[in-house]
Image: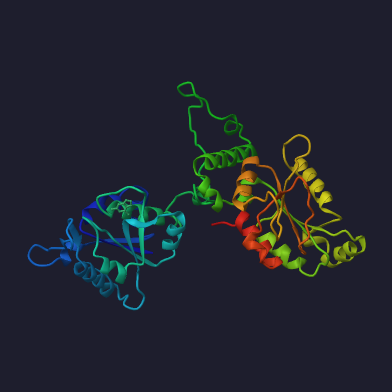
Amino acid sequence: MRFTIITAFPDFFRDFLSTSIVGRAVKAGLFQVEAIDLRSFGKGAYRQIDDYAFGGGGMVLAPKPLKDALNAVSARTGEQRQKPFLICPTPQGALLTQETVETLYRQPHVVIVCGHYEGIDERFIEGEVDLEVSIGDCVLTGGEIPAMVVIDAVSRLIPGVVGKSGAVKEDSFYRGMLDHPHYTRPSSWEGRGVPEALLSGDAGDIDAWRRKEAVARTVTRRPDLLAKSDLGYYAGEVYVVIECGSARHVGEWAKLCESYGVSRLLLAMNSPEKREILRQDLGESSGVKLMPSLEYAVDWAAKKGKKGGRGKGKNLPLLVEVPNSEREGARHWLDVKRLVLEKGGPVLFYLFEDDRSAEKSDAIRLVPLQEGKLPFYGKLAALLDRFLGSR
Ligand code: 6GU
């Protein structure tokens, strides 16, 4: 991929583009960057690129030099037909997120226009700019440092730029969660030790500790991020129980559950005859488990948790009912998601094909998704996407 920076201060980028990880990647040809001097498109002997703001209040970058610079980029690269993606760093932009970074990563050519002074003539922005981005609620002197932020963040998604494969996947925000704390030697420093789990050498213990810390930090520091987090990765086993009368759609449900990483799809069917027929239809390898009732499913999940996990006694799953109509004391899905993450145990989502409630007294009930208007398959998909979907 390629970046073009249009800037009145190309010198800003020299060290950035030749140092450390970005420098190495540019040298290795993993991506290309050019910085274009806006001043060389300026007017007159003084190469003027800005002018007084109409209405007063400082200097504004004029539209013509910007447009000329942009045309020069397109002419040079023969891109008249496929326009590059144009972004403009400004405190008025949408806050830069990892999602935006991923969008930019998918563009073959990103042009970054760096504003200065009071800003850029709005007509250039209206006519040419695809996206205005801000890197935080503070004011900087110009768009050069934000441009470096964008290039740095995007470049590290390019294969080969960040050394260790998998490193990107473990980053903060990759799974919608903040990163866990890190430690190195010595194991005791200024009277402070290192968490026991990290010294144990047990990969499972280390992983569990890191996930727990990541969740704890996110819940206290950035609860707003929880909407994006992948519950399956952080909270452990997720089961779905569907109470159904027939087996017509089981195949589709199972596929959906599998693609969202549900540990097991359980079907609650109280007729033994129907269960037997379905058992034969599904075969051994379906991964779907048949149960006579919800109570049975809860019990099964609890025992399963005990066997797999390291907890003592029964590890009762958090039971979450997914109704189609309003229930007293129902909770918004985001609150339930936070609850599941804080508790950390297994969770069992309970759905029924018809809108009849099991009214399990100890269940948490969700506020109906999409006002309860979704067809069953849509409801299941929406549920899984909110709790287990990756950004
Ligand atoms: Cl992208 N530009 C400027 N000039 N100031 C900022 C910013 C961008 N983001 C936050 N403050």
197 sits left or right of 159 in the view = right
**Whether residue 25 is visible:** no
Left or right of 91? Residue 272 is right
Residue at the image point whose x is 44% and y is 65% from the top? 106
- Relative placement, left or right, of 50 versus 148 is left
Lateral position of residue 248 relative to residue 375, left or right: right
Q: Position of residue 126 (x, y in %)?
A: 31, 69
Quadrant the C terminus occupies: bottom right
Seen from the viewer's position, the closer of residues 245 and 355 is 355
Displayed quadrant of residue 376: bottom right
Q: Residue at x 21, y 53 (%)?
A: 11
230 and 110: which one is in front? Answer: 230
Q: Is residue 69 visible?
A: yes
Q: Position of residue 306 (x, y in %)?
A: 77, 40
Q: What is the x, y in percent for residue 194? A: 53, 29
Q: Extreme left residue here? A: 45
In the foreground, 278 or 155: 278
The relative height of residue 102 versus residue 195 in the rendered view (above or below) is below
Instruction: Residue 47: name its quadrant.
Output: bottom left
Coloring scheme used: rainbow
User: Which residue is drawn at the image coordinates 69% and 55% (left, top)?
Assistant: 262
Say which quadrant the N terminus sits in. Answer: bottom left
Give the quarter of the image for residue 206. Answer: top right
Find the residue positioned furthest to the top. Answer: 191
Q: In the rendered image of this protein, does residue 268 appear above or below residue 249? A: above
Q: Nearer the viewer, residue 22 or 58?
A: 58
Give the total number of marks visible in the rendering: 0
Which residue is outermost to the front? 328
| Up/down of 384 relative to 78, above or below | above
